[in-house]
Image: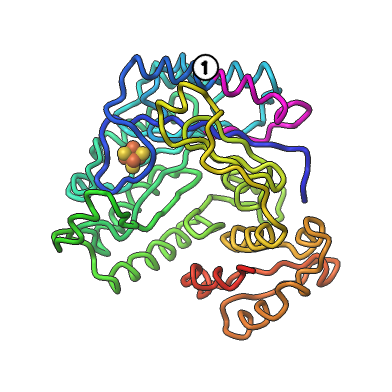
Amino acid sequence: MKNNDISIYIHIPFCVRKCLYCDFNSQVPASEDAFFYYTDALIKEISSSREYLTDRKLASIYIGGGTPSVMPSMCIDRVLGCISDIISIEDDTEITIESNPGTVTEYKIKDYVKIGINRVSIGAQSMIEDELRALGRIHTAKDFLEAYDKFYWGGIDNISVDVMTGIPYQTRESLIKTLEEVIRLHPKHISAYSLIVENGTPFYEKLMYGTLPLPTEDEAYIIYKLTQQYLAQNGYKRYEISNYALGTKSGSSKDKDYRCRHNLRYWERGDYIGFGVSSASLIGNHRFTNTAELSEYVSAPGAVKTEDMTLSDKDAMAEFMFLGLRKTDGVKISDFKESFDTDIADIYGEVMKKHIKDGLAEFIAGEEGEEDGRFMLTERGMDVANYVMSDYML
Ligand code: SF4
């Protein structure tokens, strides 16, 4: 399973305004000065990380945040230029940028295309104004439609759209309206995340005071299931707990694969390196994460780590299972053997049998029999994934 490929993540920690549910590492408001000194820091970190990139094949680059599209495109250009001085960026390298409506212009998109960005992930979240306002988003539904059009007609048609479920004021009807509006655009990929109210956010405080108008737990579950059904009915194949793609490869050579290659690397434990504040990396079993403090990062880019460890085999095996089982096609039995030189049945045989018996997982033999078969969660297993995954901790 392991090959010579590597993926790169770039974290851009700036947003126009903080959304009320957000606990990501992002600074507001973003200033022009900060964009430029942060770009210098990124370039310094990338330049000093040649050892990880030399003689590797670059599979994907993901520019996430925060809101990367608030950065001037010349900053993104400089960062990609620095990467390409070290490792070749091919035409088929997936290069994604996250973008929020209200932060893109035709001019910026033209630059993105010129510098090789070929995929965009746009945060729509909802198409209902009251819901957007309740989330504290800076954009309206109209802003989203305009941003989508700008990307599409500007030359980036591999578009992913984020929507959220279980959010304030959401009903079954409003969810369907959001999905209808999004699907009408025919994006190649949709991510549908359930709201998690994180400690330390304004939402958490409201929840504690009983003033957050969330759907009830039962209603949120119905909305979550409805999302899956509606997306499936409209040709979006679920390939991970929260991710859906059009025309996901099913063996037919005509089928184009629009799954996010970058995120698949995370779930398959491929090597990746993260640059920027709070970015995480995994090279083999070496895991390291940059400081979350912007000033600390900028004064010594890449030098201060909050985590720097080599995973034990036990931890790596557990991670292999709970990341791999997030995918609807689960884990490949032969990949486990290849990664750990041990049969999966010797480590997880009992728990796998139990999950199959309880209807939470299934095994499908491969063309060459059980050895190359796959083990995956059923839909019921996916619904209680957190509970199921905890059984794979060693
Ligand atoms: S745009 Fe995204 S990263 Fe920025 S505050 Fe909102 S949710 Fe957080």
As drawn, 205 above or below 79: below
Q: Is residue 71 above or below residue 369?
A: above
- State the residue at coordinates (50%, 53%): 244
Q: Position of residue 27 (x, y in %)?
A: 33, 31
Q: Which quadrant does the C terminus fall into? A: bottom right
Q: Which residue, as the protein is rendered here, is positioned at the far bottom?
A: 357
| Image location of residue 343, percent across then percent down | 81, 68
What amino acid type is highlighted by mark number 1? Asp
Q: Position of residue 351 (x, y in %)?
A: 65, 78
In this rendered view, identify the residue nearer to me: 340 or 233: 340
Residue located beneath label 1 in the image: 77
Would you place residue 392 above or below residue 259 in this image? below
Does the magenta segment cover residue 65? no
Helix, strand or loop under label 1: helix
Which residue is pictured at 77% across the width and 47% down the height? 2
Q: Using residue 207 as the reference point, say whether residue 323 is left or right of it.
A: right
Q: Please provide the residue range marked out in magenta.
A: 43-62
> In screen coordinates, is 119 left or right of 350?
left
Q: Judge whether residue 57 is colored magenta.
A: yes
Horizontal arrangement in the rendering, residue 77 relative to residue 192 (left or right): right
Residue 364 image offset from top left, x and y in percent: 72, 72
